[in-house]
Image (spheres, rainbow, N blue to C red):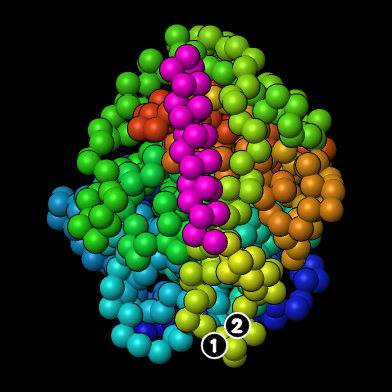
Amino acid sequence: MTDHAFPSDPTDVTTPTAPTDPGDPTGLTRLTARQLLAGYARGDFSPVDATRAVLDRIAAVQPLVNAFVRVDSEAALAQAEAAAGRWRAGAPQGLLDGVPVSVKDLFLQRGGPTLRGSGTVRAAGSWEEDAPAVARLREHGAVLVGKTTTPEFGWKGVTDSPLTGVTRNPYDLTRTSGGSSGGSAVAVALGAAPLSIGTDGGGSVRIPASFCGVFGFKPTYGRVPLYPSSPFGTLAHAGAMARDAADTALLTDVISGADWRDWSQLAPAPALGDALAEGAKGVKGLRIAYSASFGGQVAVQPAVASAVRRAVGRLAELGAYIEEADPDISDPVEAFHTLWFGGAARLTQSFGKEQRELLDPGLREIVAAGERYSALEYLAAVDARMELGRRLGRFHASYDLLVTPTLPLTAFAAGVETPGGAGGRGAGQRRWTSWTPFTYPFNLTQQPAVSVPCGVDGDGLPIGVQLVAARHGDALVMRAAHALYEAGAAHIPAPGAV
């Protein structure tokens, strides 16, 4: 087995130098999953061609952005050969046969360790079990090219860890990729596989999608089964990342397959791909609320505000009814912290002194905070969560969708948890929640939400617009995202740093 691990010096936050053109002479890494599938069907190229191109692309960009933990090229090529044989026989397997996909290193994937960004996880062992989403990818013939980086146990909104170091933004190598699914977002943005799966407990799919200029979708909680359960409980969703809405919907449909190991999974839902096939409906007639700042609670960078307003204008041009309206969201950060920090404390409850010393210092801090909460404080946070869900349910009785910025700012310096006061509510704030006020509330309420690229700032850094629906409104969210893409509103320049 050719299994390449990518160690990194976690103390090294210097900026590597980008090559003139790491290149892709075949052009295959610039194709979407659906374009690859169409090419396989026509016989223009094979899954082996696509997989080799992706593996070459990973080798070119990995030293610069540090998006992968491990790449098993031998296993990936074997999967691609098998897929090529099925296509030659006219019998493709499932919806993604031969399409390269990367997997965040929080999902179990048989054949190699899932280290979760932590030196506390022992790599030794058989590692013979797939997480539900990974099992569904295999069933649909996907080629699993590698595991992507995560902060330790996915605990924060940027991607760096004591184990693997810093993951960098493909638009500016001095900036963060966001997190916690930062490696996945970078991989998609750079053509190092057109699809990736990530997790989102407070924005961890949508944050890096916004910073890296890709689509990131957090479905309604329970639509995508999770096993093992997240230490952060029912805040954590599994989600899809891609370069357009149709690919994002396709990947979501694949990973939403039932799995008995998740007791909280939802009943099967209509395929999102079917909803997009009815694309003529688009957003015409939808009632959309536009909240620029949650009623003045959030300071938003001017470039972000302008780009999001243009996206809202495009939705109006497409026939949606737009009203400026703010949901009743008094900042729920204390309730979120109680649940999040409590989950971190539970995760590390059995750790001895030596293991705790290996942890990211910020993670140690929130573990200590979580250990101080009482059961009554935890239950009070649950009550606050339920009340927020009730208020959002009432809001969506009047509006089909809510539109906000995904984040109030563009990517800041790599290697730090917060940007200071720039663009957020956060001067003096130390935790990542200070600059993610538009994302984590919808983990508390378990609503579907997608980040769609909608422009770049003056430094060429991507900006995301967030579309949110009521629980189970996944198809509405993706219809609107697809409409923006088809109208050209989501087309931004390709990464220039790599």
Residue 141 as seen in the image, left or right of residue 157: left
Callout 1: SS: loop
Please report contact status of discs 1 and 2: CB closer than 8 Å, yes or no.
yes
Residue 245 as seen in the image, left or right of residue 87: right
Q: Position of residue 268 (x, y in %)?
A: 22, 40
Is residue 391 rendered magenta in the image?
Answer: yes
Q: Quadrant of the N terminus?
A: bottom left
Residue that mark 1 sits on: 352
Of residues 127 and 61, the one drawn nearer to the viewer in this rendering: 127
Identify the magenta region.
Answer: 374-399
Picture residue at 48% right of the left edge, 17% below the top: 399
Q: Position of residue 315 (x, y in %)?
A: 56, 17
Callout 2: SS: helix
| Magenta stretch secondary structure, dominant | helix
Q: Quadrant of the C terminus?
A: bottom right
Q: Is residue 62 among what the camera can see?
A: no
* Amino acid type shown at disc 1: Gly
Compared with residue 316, is residue 408 higher up or lower down, i.e. above or below? below
Of residues 36 and 201, the one drawn nearer to the viewer in this rendering: 201
Q: Position of residue 53 (x, y in %)?
A: 47, 62
Q: Is residue 120 among what the camera can see?
A: yes
Picture residue at 61% right of the left edge, 66% below the top: 372
Of residues 38 and 182, the one drawn nearer to the viewer in this rendering: 182
Is residue 358 rendered magenta in the image?
Answer: no
Q: Mark on residue 37?
A: none
Residue 8 as seen in the image, left or right of residue 473: right
Of residues 357 and 93, the one drawn nearer to the viewer in this rendering: 357
Compared with residue 265, is residue 148 higher up or lower down, i.e. above or below? below
Residue that mark 2 sits on: 356
Counting other residues with Cα less than 10 Å from the Cα at mark 1, is it few (<14), some (14-19), or many (20 or more)? few
* Amino acid type shown at disc 2: Arg
Q: Position of residue 492 (x, y in %)?
A: 65, 36
